[in-house]
Amino acid sequence: MTLAEAPLIEVEHLTMRFGGLIAVDDVSFSGRPCAITAIIGPNGAGKTTVFNCITGFYKPTIGRLRLRGEREYLLERMLGHEIGQHARVARTFQNIRLFPAMTVLENLLVAQHNKLMLASGMSVFGLLGLPVYRQAEQAAIAFARDWLERIGLVAMADRPAGELPYGAQRRLEIARAMCTEPRLLCLDEPAAGLNPRESAELNQLLLSIRDRDGIGVLLIEHDMSVVMSISNHVVVLDYGRKIAEGPPAEVQRDPAVIRAYLGTDDEAIDG
Amino acid sequence: MVGARLPLMLKDAALTALVAAALGVFIVGFHTVDIGSRTGLSFDFWFADLGVALVVIFLGRLGLSLAAEGLRWPAIALGVVMLIAGISPLRLPSGFLHWFVALGGALLVVRAAWPWANQAIAAGAATPTGRLIDRIGNQWAGWFLLAVAVLLPLTPIGDQKTMDLGVLILTYVMLGWGLNIVVGLAGLLDLGYVAFYAVGAYSYALLSTQHGLGFWAVLPLAGMLAASFGILLGFPVLRLRGDYLAIVTLGFGEIIRLVILNWVDLTSGPAGIGSIPGPTLFGAVFAETAPEGKQTVAEMLGVPFSSNQRLIFLYYVILGLALVTNLFTQRMRRLPVGRAWEALREDETACKALGINPTNTKLTAFAIGAMFAGFAGSFFAAKQRFISPESFTFIESAIILAIVVLGGMGSQIGVVLAAVLLIGLPEWFRELGSYRMLAFGLAMVLIMVFRPRGLIAHREPSIRLHPIGAKGGG
């Protein structure tokens, strides 16, 4: 097994209970670097719960979440913000969470907070206006500008993020997550609410993130055209359990998956 | 068409007057008077006052309805009649009624003319010159206000009364700017800000009266003490959000006040601390005769003594302190930590996902805000020369918060305007006696009606990729 094939993230026996409800039940899968791993399933299958466990918003009831970087990070033991800061896992949200009153550029600079905070000497160098900080800030702006070019929003850089059209907000949220320079990017339904053209653009963006930036992507998606055309590996959840896993073409033909999505014949007849 | 609506409007106005009468008859209509020890209390009837007030309320309501229907001229005419009746030598039963009638009339005129003014402003702002003026206004308003503030003591207007008021307003401007970091930028609703003000004030009062330290030596100490109180409070409570945080900070403000009130050995409790020395200028004191081994400022500068010198000096000290607060905040806003404050206000969950430590970021905002309150507090103690727990009640926190919110959250100039309006106006109307709080309330209501998002709702980006104008500028 070469390094590139070694899994970036390993989810082992992940279980999440809320009181009596088991939202995720003993799910294991792994995601490789330079690959898009899609998690699909009907509504309420526990996809977003898996994400919330990986990104530290929930503490898993049972299970281990291993991320390989320079060292191994056990995500279930880290605090929410540490996962972003040290393990370098970035995410987007199902309902977009930008900083609406701040400009597009400011959104991308906030994403580079920890890097800039160090460069500003915890604000001391920054307050004194030392060149160390100013250079770091220029570099951060250049980095943000690169991303603005990739998502086609350079002209909108000084507009409040909340004023952007919906599709642009989606792309900006992805760019913001990428500005944290992550190892693993978790996207929660990035194609929701996009028209076919925007959806195709999104596919291109995600492929370029996989190939150019060489990071691992975890993707929750309902839009099967997106899932089937760009993902390398698909994990299917239903009622909190993993019911299938494999390359997209294979999963598509899996009887269990078809049953989960379309219902069995019997159920269809019974209504 | 109007004829058909008129009976309805009259009925509505009459109903309003009736409600006012029901409320007012016991509050305004009767007064108890002491008619000697044997017979006890008796009633004094003020029905004439009540009658005049009800007529004004009836006419005012009618005028408002007319204005709402688009009949501006009748409404304006009604307003003008009321205004004239108010300021005319006509003998109304009390002086306050003159104010009431005149203000009511003026408001009616403003309300009726408002759509025109609004249109004219909107049309003016849309033209290129309008946009230019707007931009110049944004850029230079601050400098203009600063020039006025610096030159004020040198002009003939700068008499004792104005200077006193100026010092008071600037103290609130400084407190407003300090709280703006916490509430306006970081979005943490702090209802106990006055606690840190009290910590600063008592730090200076105790250190100067008991250990003989000077104002300038204590100033940084007071700031640090207040900041450490901020951190002390912040650690346990900053994981709370919104309303919960507001309640806990409210409690903390009261705790500090009660500790000061009850720790009599240290703070002499409700009696307060007196004879606090004022700030010195290069070691020279502001007094007619200097104490042993000291020099008065008048001697040092070789000018005759005047009681105004101390006041003008205090004015410049607080102006300087306020400007330091402002510059510091402006600078912080452009640094990563400042952007993180604003991001935290916008969406804490997203901040966490980006790897920003919310607790540390909130703590810095809380501590820095507290520090400036500490500075302002020690200035307050040095200016008043006497402090007691009465100066640090919840209403102070509420006023400072009102200044920040009404000014427009996060706007520095907005804080100045709101402080002038909310502190200056009631002081200006001091002749009205206990009715002057009406001016305070009126200012608040007017701002909320006409500028619901605060006086200055515009947010200037902390950084731009494309600077405005080819040459950039200020």
Image (tube, coloured by chain):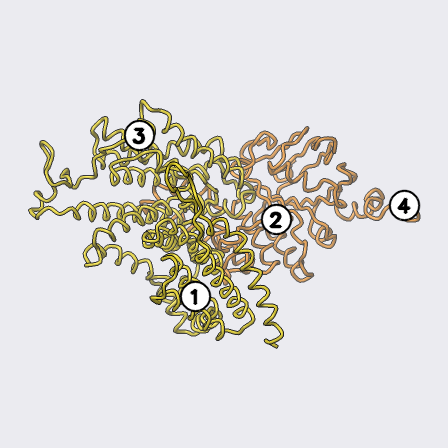
Chain colours: A orange, B yellow
Q: Residues within 10 Å of mark 1 (few under 14, many from 20)?
A: many
SS of the residue under disc 2:
helix
Viewer-side label of 1, 2 = 1
| Mark before the other along the chain sequence, 4 or 2 | 2
In front: B22, or A133? B22
Quadrant of the drawing holding the N terminus of chain B: bottom right
Q: Which residue is mark 4?
A: A267
Find numbered disc 1 in the image and state the secondary structure of the residue it sits on: helix
Task: Locate residue B397: give its quadrant.
Answer: top left
Q: Do discs 4 and 1 share a chain?
A: no
Q: Amino acid at mark 4?
A: Glu
Q: Which residue is mark 3?
A: B271
Q: CA distance from mark 4 to mark 1?
A: 74 Å
Dot 3 surroundings within 10 Å: few (below 14), some, or many (20 or more)? some
Viewer-nearest residue: A183 or A219: A219
In the rendered image of this protein, does residue B271 appear above or below residue A142?
above
Name the residue carrying label 2: A210
- The structure residue drawn at horizontal position 49% and vertical position 33%, both measured from the top left corner, is B237
Direction top: furthest residue: B265
Place of residue A219 in the rendered image (x, y in percent of width and height, measured from the top left): 67, 46
Q: Which residue is mark 1?
A: B105
Circle 2 Cα neighbour tier, 10 Å, few/some/many (<14 / 14–19 / ≥20): some
Q: Nearer the viewer, mark 3 or mark 2?
A: 3
At label 1, the amino acid type is: Gly
Return the chain for callout 2. A
From the viewer's side, name the closer residue of B195 and A219.
Answer: B195
Q: Are marks 3 and 2 in contact (CB under 8 Å)?
A: no
